[in-house]
């Protein structure tokens, strides 16, 4: 195949389009051509299916059959255009409902047993034709200004195009897993003819030094991007060594021949679970027996070929990591997969994304398969981009400033769970957004893609934390209350209370934030006090506060309406808070009605929205009095929402009639605290707003009273 000629036999473009330019009508034509080329390319992939069974029988249990994906990419355009309010009418309600959502990535032993009445191929081809004409007309008639941004109608079209290019690749992997008798080779999907079939003739991999540097991530080029590409992240990368080439089939066979699949030492817990379930003894695309290596074959898109020992091995991340552990034992070096930041540092040696001369076996510029690992030199290395994707150790996460695109709110967020590892560099069939430097795609570690690996000698230790979006409604509501945006111009409640506290206190030694919830007031107090204790009855709230203290971001969802949610995140640095404040805070779980006063004495106690939620508020006041230094300040804020669900009525401080006369909570506090405290400011109402849904809010006035201990 000639360079820069796509596998479909069609000319460019296979590269994603710039969003800017001087001529909107020229950009409109570029977009139309890009759409048409993508659409045709995707359909040409399905030319490889020789039997209808290939459409309707699952290649693997974790995914729908290919008939779903044949229709899915077309329904995506319609569903997104309707969601954006850009078209009014559906093309086919039934197809667009059935083929809207794919099977989420699951554990290897999850089985999707759902049965569907799929449309016929004739119905789907007719449907795809109607959608194509609709989208073409939409592109020709839509308003278009440059540069194209998130709110542009053209962005929705690009979202559909890049989505279809993702499925071009993932569908090719499913085709590769079908029985050979259900597929047949096509001249426009040619395999690379170059291969060494003698594994002893494969060039030996070597390690090359890479200088450390600061790596800054975040999309800066003017091309379409998915939401996880935007934001910023700066990482200091220490010097390391990296393999000059991708690990080849021959190199990986050394691990297989050494009994690597049978030796539990090389597999972590997740890897062992997958290996045992799959009964794996060698890479999944190898055909034959590892005991007879000369007869091993490799399954390609539509055929099996004698093992090309110099092509990159294609494995999942669990297998790649097991190889690295074995290699580390063999060499006595810290062999591992690279981090995303280390790969990005390597990637700097490759030219611009749009330079095909250095791009390698990518963008369908060469073949419909991998090729020798020493075929495409890029600086001192080979295949830093292209040939196969490269597994990393890094679980995908949002960069700082990450925002969900409202039209595709579940593209990235379900993968922010610590279970999806990033793949980098692209494969031979990676086109469009997949083939650019800023792309960030991730898969479950047991999944197969056209993916292999290079290894590094590095001291980097990946932080493998689970950090999914918090969906507990109470935790999410408090996070939004304490760290979310200000609603209806009402100042953040925790900060407002602390601002008042600073005016009322002279001594700034030790403060207690009791009923701290997720800790915002504690962090604000730590700007001013030498030591702060944040205490709450809820261990869950304390866990959240501790996670924030460690510098991690915390994600949560807020309800929009019904089942619809919005994804948000909290970082202390967004509030100019960080390690300095965190080092002054000790978060503890505690019961305000069972304090057991000891040696701890405080210059300030802040009890916000607490006393009307206690079983024994009078006991709390008695105990807390003994914990405050002479001259110290007690601040009590509450809307006085006395409820028997929290406080037995006989224990209510106020909001009752005593001897027939009204007794307010403020009057009761004056009576209870008179022996030990002076009230040093008139009561004042401090407003706060709690968001329940996008259109329902609680607006509350808490009364704040301030007392100084004599």
Image (tube, rainbow, N blue to C red):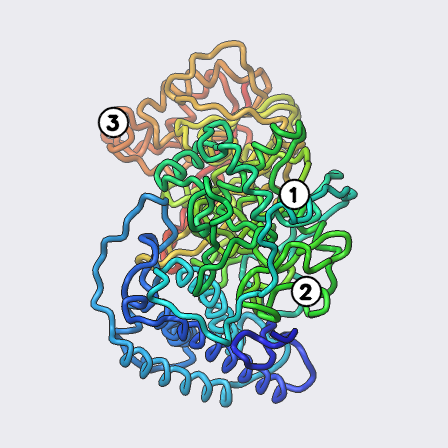
The residue pinned by badge 3 equals 648
The residue pinned by badge 1 equals 576
Residue at horizontal 48 percent and vertical 13 percent from the top: 626
Q: Secondary structure at mark 1?
A: loop
**What distance separates the C-alpha of mark 1 from that of mark 2?**
42 Å
Q: Position of residue 63 (x, y in %)?
A: 34, 57
Residue at horizontal 30 percent and vertical 59 percent from the top: 58
**What distance separates the C-alpha of mark 1 from that of mark 3?**
42 Å
In-image side of 532 versus 100 (left or right): right
Q: Quadrant of residue 342?
A: top right
**What distance separates the C-alpha of mark 3 from that of mark 2?**
72 Å
> Quadrant where the C terminus lies?
top right
> Quadrant where the N terminus lies?
bottom right
Would you say residue 609 is visible in this rendering? yes
Is the residue marked by circle 1 packed among few (<14), some (14-19), or many (20+) residues within 10 Å?
few
Q: Secondary structure at mark 2?
A: helix
Would you say residue 230 is visible in this rendering? no
Is the residue marked by circle 2 packed among few (<14), some (14-19), or many (20+) residues within 10 Å?
many
């Amino acid at each position: 195949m000639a360079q820069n000629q796509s596998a479909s036999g069609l000319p460019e473009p296979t590269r994603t389009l710039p969003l800017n330019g001087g001529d909107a009508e020229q950009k409109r034509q570029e977009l139309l051509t890009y759409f048409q080329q993508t659409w045709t390319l995707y359909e040409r992939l399905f030319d490889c299916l020789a039997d209808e069974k290939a459409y309707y029988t699952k290649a693997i249990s974790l995914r729908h059959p290919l008939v779903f994906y044949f229709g899915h990419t077309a329904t995506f355009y319609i569903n997104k255009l309707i969601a954006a309010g850009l078209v009014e009418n559906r093309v086919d309600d039934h197809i667009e409902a059935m083929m809207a959502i794919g099977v989420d990535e699951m554990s290897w032993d999850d089985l999707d047993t759902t049965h569907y009445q799929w449309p016929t191929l004739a119905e789907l081809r007719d449907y795809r034709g109607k959608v194509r004409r609709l989208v073409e007309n939409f592109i020709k008639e839509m308003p278009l200004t440059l540069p194209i941004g998130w709110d542009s109608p053209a962005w929705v079209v690009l979202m559909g195009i890049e989505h279809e290019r993702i499925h071009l690749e993932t569908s090719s992997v499913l085709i590769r897993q079908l029985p050979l008798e259900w597929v047949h080779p096509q001249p426009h999907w040619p395999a690379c003819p170059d291969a060494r079939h003698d594994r002893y003739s494969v060039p030996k991999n070597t390690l090359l030094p890479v200088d450390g540097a600061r790596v800054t991530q975040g999309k800066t080029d003017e091309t379409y991007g998915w939401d996880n590409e935007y934001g910023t992240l700066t990482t200091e990368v220490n010097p390391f060594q990296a393999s000059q080439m991708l690990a080849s089939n021959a190199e990986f066979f050394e691990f297989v021949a050494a009994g690597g699949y049978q030796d539990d030492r090389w597999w972590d817990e997740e890897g062992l679970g997958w290996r045992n379930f799959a009964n794996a003894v060698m890479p999944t695309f190898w055909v034959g027996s590892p005991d007879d290596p000369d007869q091993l074959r490799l399954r390609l898109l539509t055929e099996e070929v004698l093992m090309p020992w110099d092509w990159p091995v294609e494995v999942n991340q669990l297998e790649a990591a097991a190889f690295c552990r074995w290699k580390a034992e063999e060499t006595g070096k810290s062999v591992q997969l690279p981090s995303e930041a280390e790969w990005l540092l390597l990637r700097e040696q490759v030219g611009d994304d749009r330079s095909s001369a250095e791009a390698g076996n990518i963008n369908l510029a060469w073949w419909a398969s991998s090729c020798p690992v020493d075929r495409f030199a890029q600086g001192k290395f080979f295949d830093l981009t292209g040939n196969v994707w490269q597994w990393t150790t890094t679980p995908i996460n949002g960069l700082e400033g990450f925002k969900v695109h409202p039209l595709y709110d579940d593209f990235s967020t379900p993968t922010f769970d610590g279970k999806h590892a990033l793949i980098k560099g692209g494969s031979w069939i990676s086109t469009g957004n997949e083939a650019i430097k800023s792309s960030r795609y991730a898969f479950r570690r047991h999944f197969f893609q056209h993916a292999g690996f290079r290894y590094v000698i590095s001291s980097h230790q990946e932080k493998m934390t689970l950090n999914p979006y918090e969906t507990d409604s109470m935790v999410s509501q408090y996070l939004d209350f304490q760290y979310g945006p200000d609603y209806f111009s009402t100042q953040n409640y925790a900060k407002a209370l602390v601002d008042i506290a600073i005016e009322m206190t002279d001594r700034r030694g030790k403060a207690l934030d009791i009923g701290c919830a997720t800790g915002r007031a504690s962090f604000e107090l730590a700007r001013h006090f030498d030591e702060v204790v944040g205490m709450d009855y809820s261990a869950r709230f304390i866990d959240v506060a501790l996670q924030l203290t460690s510098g991690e971001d915390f994600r949560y969802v807020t309800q929009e309406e019904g089942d619809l949610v919005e994804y948000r995140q909290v970082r202390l640095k967004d509030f100019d808070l960080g390690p300095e404040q965190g080092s002054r805070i000790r978060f503890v779980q505690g019961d305000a009605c069972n304090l057991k006063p000891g040696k701890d004495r405080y210059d300030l106690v802040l009890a916000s929205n607490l006393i009307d939620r206690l079983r024994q508020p009078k006991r709390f006041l008695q105990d807390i009095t003994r914990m405050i230094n002479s001259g110290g300040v007690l601040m009590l804020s509450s809307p006085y929402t006395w409820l028997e669900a929290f406080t037995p009525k006989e224990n209510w401080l106020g909001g009752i009639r005593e001897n027939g006369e009204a007794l307010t909570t403020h009057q009761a506090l004056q009576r209870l605290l008179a022996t030990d405290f002076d009230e040093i400011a008139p009561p004042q109402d401090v407003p706060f707003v709690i968001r329940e849904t996008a259109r329902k809010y609680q607006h509350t006035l808490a009364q704040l009273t301030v007392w100084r201990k004599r």
